[in-house]
Amino acid sequence: MSFVSTAITVFSLLLLFHAGYSAYEFSHYLKHLTVNSNATLPIDIITETIVATCLFALGQVFGADKLRPVSFAKWAKGLEREGKSPFAFLERRPGYMNVTKLREEYASTKK
Amino acid sequence: MTTIIDTLRNAHTTSSYLNLPAESLQSLYDTSYKFVTSGAAARSLRPEDLYSVFELHFFLSIIAGKDSEASAILTTLTDRFGQDSHRVGVLRSIYFEATDGPVKALEFLSGRQDTELGTLKRKIVILKSSNQTSLYISELLKLVDNYPSDAESWAELASAYLEAGMYAQSIFALHEVLLLVPLAYNINALVGETLLLYASSLQAASSSHSLATEERLLEAVKFFLRSVELCEDYVRGWTGVLVATKRIAEIQNPFSDTSKYKRLYDVARKALTKIVETKDASESDMNAAQLVLKNY
């Protein structure tokens, strides 16, 4: 998670908390300090909630891991470059390992 | 950053120790030795990873000639899995083959169950190393009859036929491998390479260009293109396409229309030069690509 994405996420959570607290305050004042209540939740609190949600989503997306390939060809290319091919065993054939030959080759080059 | 565990785990799954040069194998053995004997492996790994690392350490010790180390790790594995275990039996037979010789190994293997695939493979390898080629191929054929879904055995059979110069049979065996592992791009390239060798042998046998040679070359291009389709920027595949299309272009009076193969030649050349320019491959692959680009 990079610094920017963490910052955006934290800021969005603060905004969300602020919007929620404002909504609670609004309903509290509505109940205790007015007689007839036709008022609806102010538009700015609603906007603040929506903006906070969008910012949170943005923050999480920017902090996500690097995308890995979807197509087989690209994934295979990545593995091949790293030397981790899942099909290498078909050409190396560990079940048929020729022990004596491998030992001789190693011993001769180590001389 | 690759950790020691990742390196060792990768070496175990891809069996890279079978192809490594001596210095790399020495350093891999040193890493494995330090990791295993220090107890770090036993402390930090889950059981499935731990015993894979032990098995890898066994193979490395055997190849590096460290027989006492191999014996110690074999004892550890036997204590955990018991004498009757299939994989432990295979390791023990390898140990006997390395230290006492193939006769002792065969003696040990004949005492094992008939149904163990690993045991059958070891018996066949002992035949190969004692140079009994025809018996080796017939035993492999028997194994492949009983276990037709084992891609490794079919690949071994293909390699045996190739060494004996029986190209058609080798290609048949490789087709069987592809039936089992259709996405194996390296085997697709290998089929292409075997077909090129087959075409060469047919061309050398007859004085004029034959239909059979041309058919092999056209088929080879198909397999190389399939390997490139399965693995992007696969150097082995593109060099194969280049060589095969060049040889097709050199045919004086082809039996079929070969114009599209000239376009394929240009495509392959472009792809290879791009790989070489962007240095997108390993050292040996780059050298091979440059060599092929120069000569074809």
Image: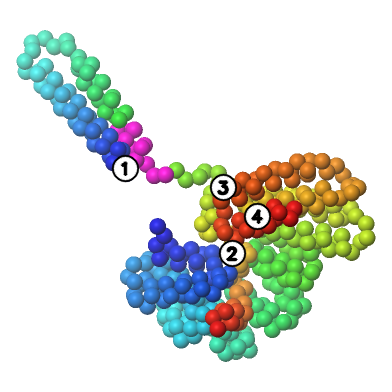
The mark closer to the camera, 1 or 4, is 4
In the rendered structure, the residue with mark 1 lies on which chain?
A: A
- Camera-side residue: A62 or A50? A62
Question: Please, what secondary structure does the residue beneath circle 2 have?
Answer: helix
Identify the residue at image location x=57%, y=59%: B283
Identify the residue at image location x=75%, y=53%: B296
- Camera-side residue: B195 or B84? B195
Check the picture and name the quadrant holding the N terminus of chain B.
bottom left
Examine the rendering and report whether any part of residue B180 can be seen. no
The mark closer to the camera, 1 or 3, is 3
Tell me, yes or no, whether the two marked residues, 1 and 3, touch with CB atoms within 8 Å. no
Q: Is residue A105 above or below residue A26?
A: below
Which amino acid does the dot numbered 1 rest on? Ser
Which amino acid does the dot numbered 4 rest on? Ala
The span shown in magenta is: A56-66
In the rendered structure, the residue with mark 3 lies on which chain?
A: B
Q: Are marks 3 and 4 on the same chain?
A: yes
Which amino acid does the dot numbered 3 rest on? Thr
Q: Residues within 10 Å of mark 3 (few under 14, many from 20)?
A: few
The alpha-carbon separation of the residues under discs 1 and 4 comes to 40 Å
Where does residue B41 sit, x and y in percent of width and height? Answer: 37, 71
